[in-house]
Amino acid sequence: MTADEREEAPHREVLRGGVAYAGAVVRIGDEVTRPANTHSATIHRFLRHVRSIGFLGASEPLAIEGDRERLAFVAGDVPVPPYPAWAQTDAALASIVRLVRGLHDASAGFDVDHGSWSDELSDLAPGRHPVICHNDVCLENVVFRDGEAVALLDFDYAAPGRAAFDLAALARMCLPVDDDVNAPRFGWTPTDRPARLRLVADAYGLDPAGRSDLVACLDESIERGGEFVLRHVEAGEPGFVEMWNSMGGMERFDRRRRWWAAARHAFVDSLE
């Protein structure tokens, strides 16, 4: 390659974040290429749907080519641990919730009965009129500009489900709803987490029934904690094995269950 050709070649960058595809998500110029899976065609169809009706806070799908998918690169800031202070603000959290509300509203009318959805992190009781849940709204899957969430990334685990179920996953990872041992490992600083759960409910516009559902979904999520990671550990996936060992195995999730049993009342009270 000549000097001129190198200068004209598109910028290439391995993107940080993620466990399953660590090192395999690559930006090439204005595009991102990453591993595809059996659900990618359905996810691309869904992303085209929400964008066609005006929701632009999701990745723009370009193509699936063999075992790789191509999406438009979304410019902005993506927080990774240890999370920066600006990503931990109430304003940042509220903007994530508003973005998820927009996604849920845009999913109305999408045909959920045809296609392939992941059941890895999906709602076990989606109900008769579900939205399409992202199911993995952690800070590493959100693009910010000037401290405000503008786009969601990585829809691999998206599936039909209850809005409250998606909000519970968001709250668990972005408040965080977590114990005082593990949260600081990700750089979280002390904060009033029950008040931040109230902020989630208010920013989404949950009515009293929705707030009750949110707590019930948190109960379910925390009770199931560790199952997803353990499945991938038992499959021998290196990124999950490393994460499992660094967190202390199942004890990390058992500790959160004990913490939630003691702390739950404060979160419930905050929603009244």
Image (cartoon, rainbow, N blue to C red):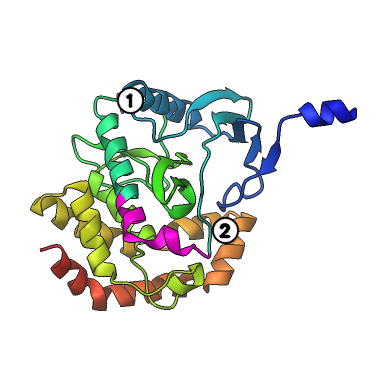
The local crowd at label 1, few if under 14, some if 14 to 19, many if 20 or more residues have their Cα within 10 Å, is few
The kind of secondary structure element at disc 1 is: loop
Q: Is residue 86 magenta?
A: yes
Up-down: is 87 above or below 146?
below
Q: What residue is shown at x 60% (from left), y 62% (from top)?
A: 241
Q: Which amino acid does the dot numbered 2 rest on?
A: Phe
Residue 154 in the image: above or below residue 174: above
At label 1, the amino acid type is: Gly
Q: Which residue is mark 1?
A: 54
Closest to the camera, between mark 2 and mark 1, is 1
Residue range corresponding to the magenta coloring? 82-94
Instruction: Tell which circle, 2 or 1, labels the residue nearer the N-terminal end.
Output: 1
- Is 93 colored magenta in this rendering? yes
Q: Is residue 124 above or below residue 271?
A: above
Say which residue appears at 58% left-offset and 54% top-offset.
Answer: 235
Q: In the rendered image, which quarter is residue 116 located in?
A: top left
**Whole-percent x and y of residue 271?**
15, 62
Residue 20 is labelled as: none
Q: Which residue is mark 2?
A: 240
Q: Are marks 2 and 1 in contact (CB under 8 Å)?
A: no
Q: Quadrant of the N terminus?
A: top right
Prevailing secondary structure of the magenta residues: helix
x, y percent for residue 197:
25, 61
Against 212, is 155 above or below? above
Q: Nearer the viewer, residue 173 or 36?
A: 173
